[in-house]
Image (cartoon, rainbow, N blue to C red):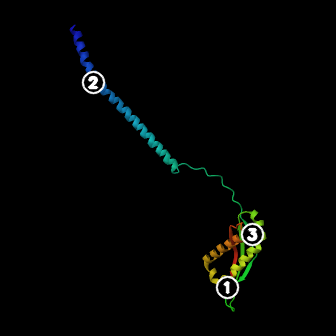
Amino acid sequence: MAAKAKKAEKEVEEAPEAEGEAPAAKPKKKLPLKLIIIAGAALLLLGGGGAGAYFYFGGHKEEKPAAVAAKPATFVDMPDVLVNLAGGGADHAQYLKVKIVLEVPDATTVPLIQPLMPRVMDAFQTYLRELRPTDLDGSAGLYRLKEELTRRVNAAIAPNRVTAVLFKEIVVQ
């Protein structure tokens, strides 16, 4: 019996220790589980943010749309223009000879502007006769001339439009 009593005392003594250890062991088990969950959430957040940044800042290759076939340019030749420039003295007349081509957006515009060519030529003649030789100096002068002629052509053929006025030849004598 003494052995049984000693055994019961040991169980009683071990029981409080077991009870004391059991609550201490539970937080140790929960703490690593919480850490694993927090670490997993942080990893998902960082991984998702990194993938989002990769796609947002161009890590992926965008598919380029199929190249649209460029429409061939359509050109309309104008008659040669020969005018005397303003500012020249009676003994020293200067002349301007210009060969011009109009660039139109498409071929369907050509028949629409052909009947208006006398109006376009009149606009060219009246403007070019007022130019002085110094107005044509340098590339800036020619650029201004091109822009002004484009504006005047578009005003003459409205509502149709030309893309540009191009010079084939410019001669000042």
Image quadrant in which you'd find residue 6: top left
Q: Secondary structure at mark 3?
A: strand
Image quadrant in which you'd find residue 27: top left
Residue type at numbered disc 2: Gly
In the rendered view, tell whether residue 158 sits above or below residue 124: above
Point out which mark residue 86 bears: 1
Measured from the top left, where is residue 127 in percent x and y? 69, 79
Pointer 3 and pointer 2: residues touching (CB < 8 Å)? no
Q: Secondary structure at mark 2?
A: helix
Q: First in sequence: mark 3 or mark 2?
A: 2
What residue sits 24% from the left and 13% below the top?
A: 8
Measured from the top left, where is residue 5 in percent x and y? 22, 11
Measured from the top left, where is residue 62 in percent x and y? 58, 50
Give the quadrant of the C terminus. Answer: bottom right
Dot 2 crowding, Cα within 10 Å, few <14, some 14–19, many 20+: few
Nearest the camera: 35 or 66? 35
State the separation of the CA atoms marked 2 and 1.
Answer: 114 Å
| Residue hosting label 2 | 20
What residue sits 68% from the left and 69% below the top?
A: 164
State the separation of the CA atoms marked 3 and 1.
Answer: 28 Å
Nearest the camera: 112 or 55? 112
In this rendering, the label closer to the viewer, 2 or 1: 1
| Residue hosting label 3 | 76
Mark count: 3
Residue type at numbered disc 1: Ala
Q: Secondary structure at mark 1?
A: loop
Residue farthest along the left direction in this orientation = 2
Left or right position of 75 against 43: right
Dot 3 crowding, Cα within 10 Å, few <14, some 14–19, many 20+: some
In this rendering, the label closer to the viewer, 3 or 1: 1
